Image: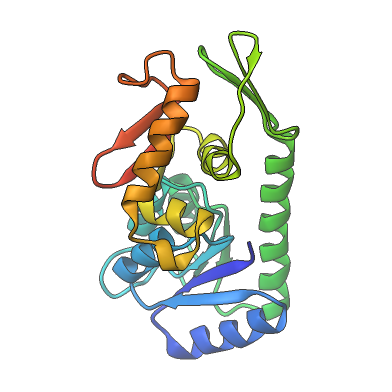
Amino acid sequence: MNTILVVDDDPHIVRALAITLKGQGYTVVTAADGESALRAAAQRPVAVMILDLGLPDMDGNAVITAVREWSAVPILVLSARHGSNDKVAALDAGADDYVTKPFGLEELLARLRAVLRRTTESSENFTTVETSSFTVDLERRQITKAGEDVRMTPTEWNILDILLRNPDKLITQQQLLTEVWGPAYAKEANYLRVYMAQLRRKLEDEPGSPRHLITEPGMGYRFVP
C-alpha cells in the first residue's frame, strides 16, 4: 500500500506535493478540507496522511482526533503554525510527526520515509495475537482455538488480518471492502455481514454474543483483544 492522502486547501502546495510524491512512486489522493479528508480516509486504505492544520471547515487537530477513533494510519502534519504549543497539541491528538511551512521537499520526503519505516517495523514485530477464545500467529497465518487448528479461507483471513492489526480501532465497512475486494465493492456491505458471521462461528465462543469481533452498527467492525 503506497497511497498518500494529502490534505491542504492551498492548491499550489497540493500540486507541488502531488508531482513530487508521484515522482517517488506513490499514489496520491487529495482533499481540500477536513470533511473531504475524513471521507477519503474512510473510503480507501492509505499509507500516510499529510495534513495541514489550517483547513477551511475544521481545525486539523479535530481531523486527527476523528481519524484516531477508528484508524492508526500515520499522520504527518504540515503546517504554518510554528509555536511549540501547536506542535504539542497536534502530537497529543495523535499525529506522528510535524513539519512547519515553508518546508524543503527533501526533508518532507525523509520524514515520510521515516514514518513509513516505523510503521513497517511495528507491523513486522506484531506477530501474535492472543484472546480468551483463540490465538493467531500472523506471520505463519495459523489460528488455534481450544488447542485445535482453525482453517480460514483467503478472504476470511484477509478480513481478520486487518482487524487484528488494528486492535480496538473502528475499521469502517468501506475500508474493509476496498482493501479486501477492491474499490468497486466499497458499498457491498452484505459481503462483510456474511464473512463476519463465518468468522464469529469459527472463532467466538458464543457467536451470537461476540466478545472479540464487534459490530459498530452503520459504521464498521472492531477487534477487541
Q: Residue at x 47, y 59 (%)?
A: 178
Q: Residue at x 65, y 79 (%)?
A: 21
Q: Residue at x 43, y 39 (%)?
A: 195
135 over 18 or under it: above or below: above
**Quarter residue 164 falls in:** top right
Q: Nearer the viewer, residue 43 or 151?
A: 151
120 over 163 or under it: above or below: below
Residue 13 position in % (x across, y down): 51, 85
Q: Is residue 44 visible?
A: yes
Q: Is residue 225 visible?
A: no
In this rendering, position of residue 21 left or right of residue 53: right
Residue 176 position in % (x across, y down): 45, 51
22 over 199 or under it: above or below: below
In this rendering, position of residue 54 left or right of residue 124: left
Residue 181 position in % (x across, y down): 50, 58
In this rendering, position of residue 126 left or right of residue 199: right
Residue 55 position in % (x across, y down): 34, 72
What number of labels is visible? 0
Q: Residue at x 55, y 45 (%)?
A: 155
**Quarter residue 61 falls in:** bottom left
Quarter of the figure that contains the N terminus = bottom right
